[in-house]
Image (tube, rainbow, N blue to C red):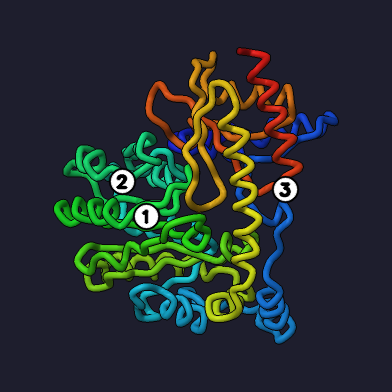
Amino acid sequence: MIQPARHIANVKYAIRNIAAEAARLEAQGMKILPCNIGDPLRFDFATPPHLSEAVERALRDGHNHYVPSAGLKEAREAVAASLQPTVRPEDVFITAGVSEALDLALTALLEVGDEVLLPSPGYPLYNAIATRLQATVVPYFLDESKGWALDAEEIAAKVTSRTRAIVICNPNNPTGAVATRTQLEQVLAVARKHRLVVLSDEIYDRVLFSGEHVPTATLCDDVPLITLNGLSKAYLCPGWRVGWLAFNTPKLLSGVAASVQRLADARLCGPGPFQYAVKPALEGPQDHLPQMMKKLRARRDLMMKRLRAMPGISVVEPQGAFYALPSIERAWAGGDEAFVLELVRETGVLFVHGDGFGQRPGTRHFRVVFLPSEPVLSAAFDGLEGFLRARS
């Protein structure tokens, strides 16, 4: 039997992995209450009609051909104009989601054995890409006691001579934390001192409950900076796979940009017809956003009320995105992965274990996605509360 590459054994993706057990249970007839996946269209949200119409028009007009490898011209122009501060269209690459944007950027940056600083908790795809590239993942822990804050001192302490980049996720998946201006400035100071590239994932920038989102690029022009974003979350079309990366400081990253161009050329292009939705999304009606946020706010508030009343659970209120990362205060045999597996097997309530996103040693968490309707969330929290009380 042909053996696979050994380094792929370390590539893991907790969100999909835990769902496999739920799928097995569902096939046996168990009703699953899904609070595990950040896809609004699995629930009662819909893509804005003017975006669907733009894609339909592109399909009907015969735009089913390859587009330029860096992306459709009008899409790149719209992204460039939407950024703060604006960039040149040639500094923007349209990608197959933010996942590919990050993949292209890290592939262009990292040599085997280079170190990359990743948030913990953080989106597990970051780790999966770095591991596949045979780079060394160095987690930096967010400060739960301060609302899952970015901690520049924690980051600075992890920098070595092999460190190449820092990844920021703001707002954060899985915690829902929104970084303050001061926190971002302090992280940029670390990057400036050590000549590190900062990759700022801002896919949830328009999904805010309070405060403001500060684009990292507004805070510096002398740190190598790449911003990642896309249509999936705020514009409710994750399956279209439309994302982008922008070189905010192109003079500092010209070689990396040229490498990204070569990588983009090698994969031909991202999905073409869906790129025709970028300009209408960024420049057209935005009225779906307050409607979406009204739903999400009510669901977040329901979640917070229920979780705060449960024994052995503490939770930081999310300020953005549609996730929370509650803490399990008691020890749990097998850790938090065992916790979520026991929970889904007994109740059908499906969360993702915190260890799949990274966490401080000795702590236990689980991620809640509060996209489901209020009746579904209520049923899920009923199941969780009963599960906890039976073991108290």
* Mark 2 secondary-structure assignment: strand
Q: Position of residue 379 (x, y in %)?
A: 74, 35
Q: Is residue 371 visible?
A: yes
Q: Amino acid at mark 1?
A: Leu
Marks 3 and 2, the one that precedes in the sequence: 2
Image vertical order of residue 235 relative to residue 375, above or below: below
Image vertical order of residue 382 relative to residue 167, above or below: above
Q: Amino acid at mark 2?
A: Val
Q: Position of residue 347 (x, y in %)?
A: 74, 26
Work out how far the residue at label 2 is from the one at label 1, CA to CA, in angstroms.
Answer: 9 Å
Q: Residue at x 43, y 36 (%)?
A: 7
Q: Is mark 2 in CB contact (under 8 Å) with mark 1?
A: yes
In depth, the one of 84 and 26 nearer the eye is: 84
Q: Residue at x 45, y 61 (%)?
A: 101
Work out how far the residue at label 3 is from the one at label 2, CA to CA, in angstroms.
Answer: 38 Å
Q: Amino acid at mark 3?
A: Ser
* Mark 3 secondary-structure assignment: loop
Residue assigned mark 3: 373
> How dense is the environment of label 1, judged by Cα within 10 Å: few (below 14), some, or many (20 and up)?
many
Residue assigned mark 1: 106
> How dense is the environment of label 3, judged by Cα within 10 Å: few (below 14), some, or many (20 and up)?
some
Q: Residue furthest right?
A: 29
Marks 2 and 1, the one that precedes in the sequence: 1
Label of residue 116 in the image: 2
